[in-house]
Image (spheres, helix red, strand yellow):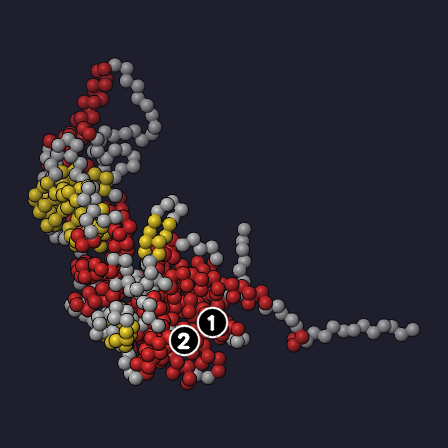
Amino acid sequence: MAAPAVSQPRSSKTESYVDNKRKEDIRHANIVAARAIADAVRTSLGPKGMDKMISTASGEVIITNDGATILNKMEVLQPAAKMLVELSKSQDSAAGDGTTTVVVIAGSLLKQCLSLLSHGIHPTVISDSLHKTAIKAVDVLTAMAVPVELSDRESLIKSASTSLNSKVVSQYSTLLAPLAVDSVLSVVDPAKPDLVDLRDIKIVKKLGGTVDDTVLVKGLVFDKKVSHAAGGPTRMENAKIAVIQFQISPPKTDIEQSIVVSDYTQMDRILKEERNYILGMIKKIRATGCNVLLIQKSILRDAVTDLSLHYLAKAKILVIKDVERDDIEFITKTLNCLPIANIEHFRSEKLGYAELVEEASMGDGKIVKITGIKDMGRTATVLVRGSNQLVIDEAERSLHDALCVVRCLVSKRFLIAGGGAPEIELSRQLGAWAKVLHGMEGYCVRSFAEALEVIPYTLAENAGLNPITIVTELRNRHAQGEINTGINVRKGQITNILEENVVQPLLVSTSAITLATECVRMILKIDDIVTVR
């Protein structure tokens, strides 16, 4: 009997089956989740954008339309959606403004990617094309930019005003924009003209009054009153100021222990020693001519006691206690003095000098102002006022954005038109470039060009205009060579945006394009999510 024929398995590459459905599903889920985040903040884009009211778990309420703040307070669980929150933070640290724009562009790019994927284009091809297009886009934007000098204060104020116009406190932009420009220019170091450290600008918030009462102070402001429990001075002219990091109070043992006192004579001796110890310290302080003390907050024991305050008042020394440790560096830089960590190191050369230190009533509380500082460091203090805490917090966030805009112009001195003009011009030029390219690349570049139209479309939509008519008219104007034509939201029509003084730093636009592209490329490349418990 013949043996049964054993069928040989045919190993052919063409017949191997790979299940790509799961990969497609995960990619699709990631894109949908990220787009949901972009759609949530889209309505807050532009001067006529809506505000969001955020209620936190602790019951705190925040009203803002700053993209970074909205996304930061959102509780996002999906990993890909979290990437858009991080994207907004990156834009905030890189440029300070355009945090909503970057998320909206990323959402629009993801929408186009979904369409390209459904046509069977490989994610890697899309990713590489996006990278090339982003580089080209930055070149186009740079070609459109107008150079600006730091001496041109008007142009700097225009760009700061554009940033503030989309905020809740936009009606105060005429006050806050010059204030932001002056404070940044006052901290620019001639030795490093391209660098601005915003930590050199301190924002002090004080409840009461209106945002109109916000001022730039040449000196220091403390949101606390002078410690005059024992009737010490509250005003000091020709002040010699010491910043101390030690305590003017009786010493404590290093280890936790209790001392038993058996009779009154021993008790008197302890109290006498305490008095002598404190008096000895104050005599050393007084010997240097110091008449104002800034005492760092202490966590180990009281920085000052009632007894030491009494002796300091007798010595006519003005005392400001509970200065935060984080503020010490800023204070010493402003006063041009050194912090003193030990009474033995207390010398006159470590002191700072100012014309006046005084306590002033403000709102329902008091503040301490130090003005006329000798050899003042390159710092600035902004005192922000407001009728309630929500307004003050939003004014601080808006001012931070305006400061960042001016910082961008210091580091990269180019201005670009706002109002959707750069995005439409980019879309037009990239569309023309796509026609020159061959194959899949051309498709991807065209999709990128279409995605950028989301900014003018959203600006028009949020302003209650007809977006299709506006965007079509914009395309037409740009095709005729009017590259600075954009949407004038205030007039509800299309005008030359540069003439309307709606300008923004080049860095804001270029970093928005590059960061959004980078984020989208990363989301595209993800084909699986692995959860580790």
Mark 1, residue position: 113
Going 21% across and 38% down the picture, which residue do you hit? 321
Going 25% across and 39% down the picture, which residue do you hit? 297
- Checking the image for residue 450, the label placed there is 2
Q: Nearer the viewer, residue 20 or 347?
A: 20
Looking at the picture, does residue 447 appear above or below residue 291? below
Q: Residues within 10 Å of mark 1 (few under 14, many from 20)?
A: many
> Which residue type carries mark 2?
Glu
Residue furthest to the top in view is 263
C-alpha separation, residue under disc 1 versus residue under disc 2: 11 Å
Q: Residue 237, image x and y in percent?
A: 7, 43
Looking at the picture, does residue 42 appear above or below residue 217? below
Q: Residues within 10 Å of mark 2 (few under 14, many from 20)?
A: many
Q: Is 353 placed left or right of 63 in the picture?
A: left
Q: Quadrant of residue 351?
A: top left
Q: Nearer the viewer, residue 295 or 47?
A: 47
| Element carrying mark 2 | helix
Q: Is 470 placed left or right of 292 in the picture?
A: right
Mark in front: 1 vs 2:
2
Assign the N terminus to one quadrant of the image. Answer: bottom right
Q: Is residue 332 visible?
A: no
